[in-house]
Amino acid sequence: MPSDEKPTVPKTILDLVERFERNREAYKSGHYNETQVRREFLDPFFEALGWSIDNKQGYAEDYKDVIHEDAIKTTDGTKAPDYCFRIGGARKFFLEAKRPSVDIKNDVSPAFQLRRYGFTTKLPLSILSDFEEFAVYDCRFKPDKNDSAAVGRILYIHYTEYATRWHEIAAVFSREAVLKGSFDKFAESSKAKRGTADVDDAFLETIETWRKELAQNLALRNKQLSQRELNFAVQRIIDRIIFLRICEGRGIEDYGRLRALADGDKIYPRLGKLFEQADDRYNSGLFHFRAEKGRHEAPDELTLKLDLDDKLLRDILKNLYYPDSPYVFSALSANVLGQVYEQFLGKVIRLTEGHQAKVDDKPEVKKAGGVFYTPTYIGEYLVQNTVGKLLEEVAGSTGHWPVPSGDSPDGVEGTVTMCDGASLCNIVFLVPVGGSPTGAGESPAPPTFQTHS
């Protein structure tokens, strides 16, 4: 533990223990539900640790100590944990509540669900509790539906031990301990040398496996494909599947549409229909199958005509969903996806003389010693000190701040309109976009530029 000092056990905790002991049989019956245990036991338990469960201080939404499940609920087939504890708006750990009739020590499902969400959101530790049992999990272990409830569990305390082991809980999970850095120190000291994994690395491994298998299958079934076409097809199929799965998780698409395709045959033609529907809905380069007036980008006339094995696609699609997937797609951050794709694009598919697919590092990546992702905070700093400064100057000279295009009178995509309908519309941003070759042995594509008014 971070400290040998043992704080006094609050009277609230001793009273809760005594009440639970007195009525334990009733609480452990199936009639005592999760909401009751939260209100009567877990809320006061964590208030005793210094957390403002009900935001009695009246903090703004972005700075509340605790966010309850209704504020972070997902449509991803499983609900988010019941509590999210934060400091200054930054997540520190989750708490998943269960009714006391649940056997937290041995039941696989609650532990798997908690670890899955913590793993996806990159939180090192989270808690599972029904008050009777208090279990802390290291969420850096990649969750698997076949794991026992003990996998990743680094602390287990029974309610009968709260009086003697309160210091172990308070020294790490009290608000004061988190503010003083004790939580972070404990998380780092608890990190196993083996078995833990970062969600970035795990997701990268997943899509690299897809790439290899898709490339091999497409090369086998579509002998007419050139190396460039094979790279394009594999990349587009993966991108489209991930995009639609994340849309499902965030409620933009109906949940389970991709999974439903796995229940029949001729999966790829039916998947292609979803891609075409997405073309109509999103009108983006990712789904662009028909020539359109005023659009200079050539449509994709290749990928929908390809032949792809049902078994391979069935495995990929089924493993996008709970309980087979270790990821909560609604909670995958843009930063995680950016880091994963930066690494993913560092490799390329090449075709052998026998038209077999092999995946290799790009020559320029080998020479550079790897791919390096620009951290989010650096990107934010660059934007704030370039575009941000410019916007401040314009706003200062006009007395108005810009509003997003969706709120502007004309609603034109890609524009920023001043509240007075003027100044910023004349500003054009030039964004360099680094090119990336799609075939091995080809020279890197020259940088392109996008302009945004």
Image (cartoon, grey):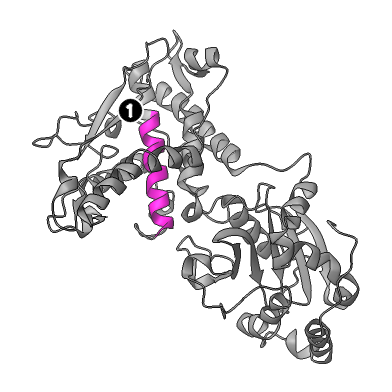
Expressed as whole percent of the image width and height from the top left, the position of residue 103 reads 75, 71
> In this orientation, which residue lies closer to the viewer: 104 or 137?
137
Q: Residue at x 45, y 40 (%)?
A: 381
Q: Quadrant of the C terminus?
A: top left
Magenta includes 239?
yes
Percent of width and height locating residue 330: 47, 55
Q: Which residues are magenta?
A: 234-250
Answer yes or no: is residue 213 visible: no
Q: Residue furthest top?
A: 353
Q: Is residue 239 left or right of residue 283?
A: right
Examine the structure image and report whether residue 322 is included in the region drawn in magenta: no
Q: What quarter of the picture does the N terminus occupy?
A: bottom right
Position of residue 234 measured from the top left corner of the image (x, y, whole percent): 40, 29
The crowd level at tag 1 (other Cα within 10 Å; few <14, some 14-19, many 20+) is few
**Chief SS of the magenta region:** helix
Q: Is residue 377 visible?
A: yes
Q: Residue at x 38, y 60 (%)?
A: 251
- Identify which amino acid the numbered label 1 is placed on: Val
Q: Which residue is mark 1?
A: 433
76 displayed left or right of 436: right
Of 180 and 259, nearer the camera is 180
